[in-house]
Every structure is written in structure tokens, then in C-alpha cells.
Amino acid sequence: MGAIELVCPAGSPAMLRAAVEAGADSVYCGMRDDTNARNFPGLNFSPAELADSVAWAHDRGARVLLAVNTFARAGAGDRWRASVDAAAASGVDAVIVADLGVLAHAREAHPDLRLHLSVQAAAGSPEAIAFYAEAYGVKRVVLPRVLSVEEIAALMREITVETEAFVFGGLCVMAEGRCALSSYATGRSPNLSGVCSPPESVTYTEEEGALVSRLGGLALDRYAPGEPAGYPTLCKGRFAVGGELSYLFEDPVSLNAMSLLAALRRAGVTAVKVEGRQRGKAYVARVAAAFRGAIDALDQGLDAAPYEQLLTDLAEGGRETAGAYRKTWR
Amino acid sequence: MSDAIQLTLGPLLFNWAPDRIRDFYARIADEAPVDRVYLGEVVCGKRAPLIDAALADAAGRLAEAGKTVVWSTLGLPALKRDRKAIAALAAEQEMLIEINDVSGLQGRAGAFVAGPLLNVYNEGAARELMRRGCVRLCANVELSLEAVSAIAAGCPGLEIELFAFGRLPLALSGRCYHARRHGLHKDSCQFICDRDPDGLALKTLDGRDFLAVNGVQTLSHGVQLAAAEPEALTAAGVTALRLSPHTADMVAVAEAFRARADGRIDAAELAARVEAAGPPGVLVDGYLRGTAGLEAVGGAA
């Protein structure tokens, strides 16, 4: 059983270098437009920055994966094709794609370019994965975060491609790529615009002594004075059902599956992935170093437990979960 | 031109009792001016065994009444049984089916409808599906009429269906929110979603109607109403309007849409008639205008 590959986020060239220096085997990033799913102001790479970063990473034995993982806007497919072409020109090790049209372009225009299937494509069954592998030559699938470790192990027995599983960072509670809550409230969503719960739609207001967070004018949570206020991501909001308030979809938690690294490796997962291209180089340096330590410990037959508590304070909202990887989550 | 627009009834998204299902489709068969009816459990595979017999009866009844019946696949297979059900339907190569998850494309050679739960956002993706037998696309609900028009323009020969009435299917999850709401686990859910025949309404902290939960699915609380001029729909490539079943008077809803598609009533009259049929929320159409989906019909874009 080989070492598990550590895939870390890079929202900028500096963050890419920080990730590699802290021990990432691979780094993923996006172009500075809506062709990637972290389309935030000030983030991401120009074609020149991408080419420089790929050369820098390759000199250090690290791989660079380019996420072209949003769905092309109708009538505007040129931009997505241009991102794939820029990826191929820069010598990236793979592109991460979700859209059938973008996959087809990559396959036809760049037959040697390695294709990874984005989590946004929501391929969670052996049949769906086989379809993408046979139709487009996809070599690796980023697994939807709706699967338990047991289900991943069963899945691995029925597929022939590599898999990559999210282990740290933001946690989608819906099947990724199958959620339009954000656009229903704001007009912008991951599939339409590469953003979820977009920052320009967020407000915080003082009301009756409490701080109220809103998205698109909808009150999503309320905080007492002094209580740390979270970001109003739709699925982590507090809602009223039959007059009773609850975090109906998910508590304001983030994913930390470090305790499941050994199980994921046993299941046959090729790579583990850290979310958070928007969270900066200090974040990625700490997360990459902690996971590097845990993976190396497992490789040496040692316990990874000492690494598990290293990142608790980085969790959004300060609380963590292993999410769907533990079956009781459902 | 406009009288060419078909009406279809989408698959039932909610957990209704078998008797209710039989009665519902019997009335649709006898009275509703719809050309095509999609049948099949698309939300939760656990429900399928409960309703299979009722849906089979409904299919017979609808076919006798001259309606085209198209079986729809599940949207998010979770169990081995779900996968088998999708594969079995996909293997019926001579029969037109609706595919709602990419799983259904594997091994499919025959004609199919791409359902609204598939991620088709552009003409390139639609053309990929056409190469594999897609004859009709029911546009994803996030798409604006302008985007639908661009897809149609890039895909000559593709029939386009628009989600025209009903709570919008917004998300699917591995987690069951009905079970979570009632302190149960998905694996022992007691099928508690049957208590809410239009979904479980959910309000924001400041009391605003927002979403509706339907097991593993999340829908809008607002009810989509595509009221555009029939000429505008035809110009955008739309060949059919999909009405999604609710407890509202679906015969009255279908009659109102038929009248609108035939140019006999205006948008205001359509909205008034649909309101009178008892929809479970306010009428919205923001997505079609390229803005937030919850924007009310008649609002500024």
C-alpha cells in the first residue's frame, strides 16, 4: 500500500509555494475568472503566474492541478476552453473538470492532458464513474462528500480509476454540484458563478442587542454580544420549522477527517484533499504540515493521533466533524 | 406556432400514499390536458418499493387515456438497489426514459430525456448528451430563459422542456432532513416524509418563507410560474412546459397553462388561475429572468 497523496489548495502563487514547502505532494489552483469554483476577488492565477508556478513546483517534485471545475455558461464556452488550453500550455499535471462540454474539449484538443473529475460532477456510483472514465478517459475522481468510508471501500472494489477524498475544510452537506440554494437566495451559485453564498450578498446588522447575519437579506443566524459570528453559508443557517429553531441542514461545523486517514488508505483512496483556496498561505502551511506529519506517521506504522488536535482552532465556527464519512451523520 | 408547446407532468417528488397516487393519476388521465407524464421515484430510493405498484397502475391508466408515459430515474443513487433500478431502466433501450443522474448514461444507447437534476448548463454539454441519444432536455432550474435560448440555438433538433410550475428542486443530499428534523436516522426513517405532501416548510429567523424539505431533497418554498408569452418561449426553443405535481388542483393548473400556451389568456390571468388552484407558496420566476430564484412573479429583474 503506497503513501497517500496530499493535495492542498492554492489561491495564489505565494500560497502554492507555502503548501509545497509545508509538505503538499500536489497543489490545485484556478484561473482568475469564473471557470473555477473559488471565483473570489483577488484570488487565483493569471496564465503567466500559472506557468511560473508549475515550473517552480516541478523543480521541487510537486504536482500542480488546475481546477476548471465550474459549468460553462451557455453561449460563453470560449472562456472554459481557454482555461483548459492555458492549463495544457503551462504543463500542469492534470485539469479538474466537471462539465461534459469542457471534458469533451479537453479530450479532443489535448488528448495527453490528464483529466480528473471534479467533485462538482457528483459522480458517486461505479456506473457514473465508469461513464466518465470510458467516455472521456478520466483518470481520477474526486469523491462526493456524501459517502461513508465503508461505501468508499465498496466503491473502490468496483472501479478502476484513482480516487481523491476531501479530508479538511469547508463541508458541503448537499451533494456538491447538485445544490442551487445559493442562487435561489442571491442569483449566484457554485454551478452558475463559481461561488456559494457570495460575499457581496452578506450583511451583519445589530438588532435588539444581537448581531444578525444575512444572506441576500434573509436572516440566517443571530449572535449574542461577544459570541463569535460565523459566515452566513446557507446550509449552515438556523431555520424555523413549525415554530422551532434549529440548524436543520448542518451545524456550523467544518470537516476534519484526519482520524480517518488510515481507514481511507485501507479503502484504497489514492489522494486526500484539503479545501480552502480562499483561506491564505498561513492556513495552508499549517494544514499541509499537520497532514504531512500524519501521513508520514502512518507510513512508518506509527499512530497519527498526535496530529489530530493540531488544527482544531482553524475550523470555521471552531467545531469539526468527520461528516458523511461516519455513517451516523445521515 | 405557440399551440405547438406541449404540457408535461413531471415525476411526483413527494412521498404520497399509494391510494392517493392512484387517485391523482386517474384524474390526470381523465381530465388534465397534458401530453406526457413522467413517472418514477426520483428523490429517495427507499420509497420506491412502497409506490411501485401504484405507479404501474397509473402508467396503465395514463396510457389508456392517450398520454405518453416516460419513466424517470432516481436523482441520487445511494444504495445498491438504487443503482440496480437505474441500470435496469437504462437497459430498456427501446423505451424513452428520463435520466436524472449520470449513472443512467452508462450503458445507455437508446433515446432519453435529460432530466432537470442533471447538470447541463450549456450547449456543449447538451451536445455531448445528444451524441449519446438525448432527444429532449428539461433545463436545470437555475438556468435563465436567455441561457435556455443559447442552449437551444447551439443544439438544433433538441426538444427543450421548461420547469414551469411547482416548487423548484434545489438540492439533493446524502442526509435526510426529514429524519434529522424528527430525531431519526436515514436508515430507520419510518418514512416520515409522508407527513408533508408538498414538503416541510422552513422559514428564516425573521419569519420569511424560504425552503421546503422533502427527505434528502430541498425545494424552494416559492412556486415557479413560467408565464412568458408563448411566442417568447417558442423563440427561446422551448417545446414543452413541465408542471410538477403538488396537492394543488393540478387539472386546473394544467388547464390554465394550456390556455396560456394557446394564447387564450395573458400572464396575469395565468397567475390568477394558478393562485386559485392552491399552490403551496408564493409564485416566483426569478431564475427565468436571470436573478435570484425566489424573486416573485412580476418583480423587477
Image (spheres, rainbow, N blue to C red):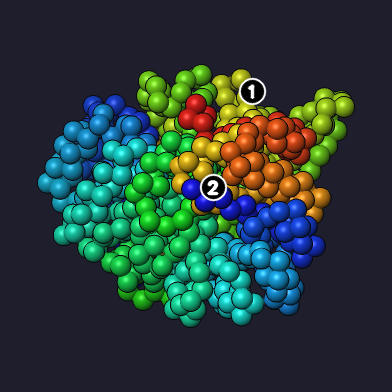
Residue at image position (66%, 64%) is A62
Residue identifier under label 1? A245
Residue identifier under label 2? A165
What is the tally of numbered marks visible in this picture? 2
Instruction: Indicate the quadrant where residue A83 lies.
Output: bottom right
x%, y% of residue B167?
47, 42
Residue at image position (47%, 20%) is B184
Q: Secondary structure at mark 1?
A: strand
Q: Chain of mark 2?
A: A
Q: Residues within 10 Å of mark 2 (few under 14, many from 20)?
A: many
The residue lying toward the viewer, choosing from A18 and B242, is: A18
The residue lying toward the viewer, choosing from B60 and B101, is: B101
Q: Is residue B82 left or right of residue B58?
A: right
Q: Is residue A228 left or right of residue B292?
A: right
x%, y% of residue B37?
26, 48
Q: Is residue B164 above or below residue B30?
A: below
**Does residue B237 appear anywhere in the picture?**
no
> Residue type at mark 2?
Ala
Residue at image position (63%, 65%) is A63
| Front tag of 1 and 2 | 2
Q: CA distance from mark 1 to mark 2?
A: 33 Å
**Does residue A114 appear anywhere in the picture?**
yes
Pointers 1 and 2 in contact (C-beta within 8 Å): no
Tell me the quarter of the image containing the C terminus of chain B: bottom right
